[in-house]
Amino acid sequence: MSWQDKVVIVTGAGSGIGRAVAHRFAKEGAHVVVVNRTAEKADRVAEEITGNGFSAIGIAADVSSEEDVRRVVAETIQRYKHIDVLVNSAAVCPQIRLTDMSLEAWNRVITNNLTSVFLFCREVIPHMLTAGGGAIVNISSVHALATLDGYSAYAASKGGIVALTRAIALDYAKQNIRVNTVLPGAIQTPMLESSVKNLETPREDIMREWDNAQPMGRIGQPDEIATVVLFAASPDNSFMTGATLVADGGMTVDL
């Protein structure tokens, strides 16, 4: 599949999985819109891509803001005239037990992780309908299937993404818009690193424990998830919609 001149929006693309996805689409010839909360990170990744001879622009946006989401989509249409692929990768992941969590903290997780998917899909789909179709890939997590202590809000948001993906896929299946979700396991990203930085155990020891806990003997890399995302989005994968693709190194099948 050639992505030459396709237009792809990637949220949360300032680092981690989103950054890897943006780089992969651009390398395959797509025009990539790098969306991140901070302009510095969005512009940095866009500059990395253009520095390698590919096409990208950075746009700073709060993905939980209806106004910001509309602005991102409007700027993309103004510049490129169409949108072929949307990848919702933005997320926050605080580790807080339910009874210790404020309503503000809960809402921050839900709006950034789940409401953002609703907002971007709602704004992008009309343009895809006009163009005759498109593909959406929502990044969930294995926390949608099995979770850990302190991740109630995160797990709820990621489970919501899986359910929302199925519903959107059903709504637009006849209009040639495919919507799938990818559930990564433990991936070497700044989000994973931040989850261990405040613990007393040395980071190296914790990361070694993470590796040893995986059936494959290691955690995953962002590029490995990017490969799954491109597969899910590809027109060559034309009969898959509403699917949940687990890429976790066997974590959730290890009893």
Image: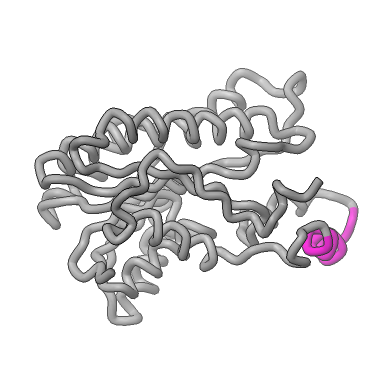
Nearest the eye: 241 or 77: 241
Residue 125 vs residue 82: left or right?
A: right
The answer to whether 61 is drawn above or below residue 115 in the figure is: below
Quarter of the figure that contains the C terminus: top right
Indicate whether residue 134 is drawn in magenta.
Answer: no
Q: Residue at x 77, y 52 (%)?
A: 196
Residue 233 vs residue 155: left or right?
A: left
Q: Residue at x 11, y 50 (%)?
A: 78
Residue 215 vs residue 194: left or right?
A: right
Quarter-of-image position of residue 52: bottom left
Query: Residue 190 location, x and y as percent?
Result: 62, 57
Residue 178 vs residue 215: left or right?
A: left
Query: Residue 141 location, x and y as percent?
Result: 58, 44
Query: Residue 206 location, x and y as percent?
Result: 83, 59
Identify the colour scheme used: one colour
Q: Residue at x 25, y 67 (%)?
A: 3
Name the magenta segment's main secondary structure: helix
Quarter of the figure that contains the N terminus: bottom left
Indicate whether residue 207 is drawn in magenta.
Answer: yes
- Looking at the rendering, the stretch of residues picked out in magenta corresponds to 201-212
Q: Residue at x 57, y 41 (%)?
A: 92
Is there any visible trace of residue 122 in the rendered image?
yes
Q: Residue furthest right?
A: 201
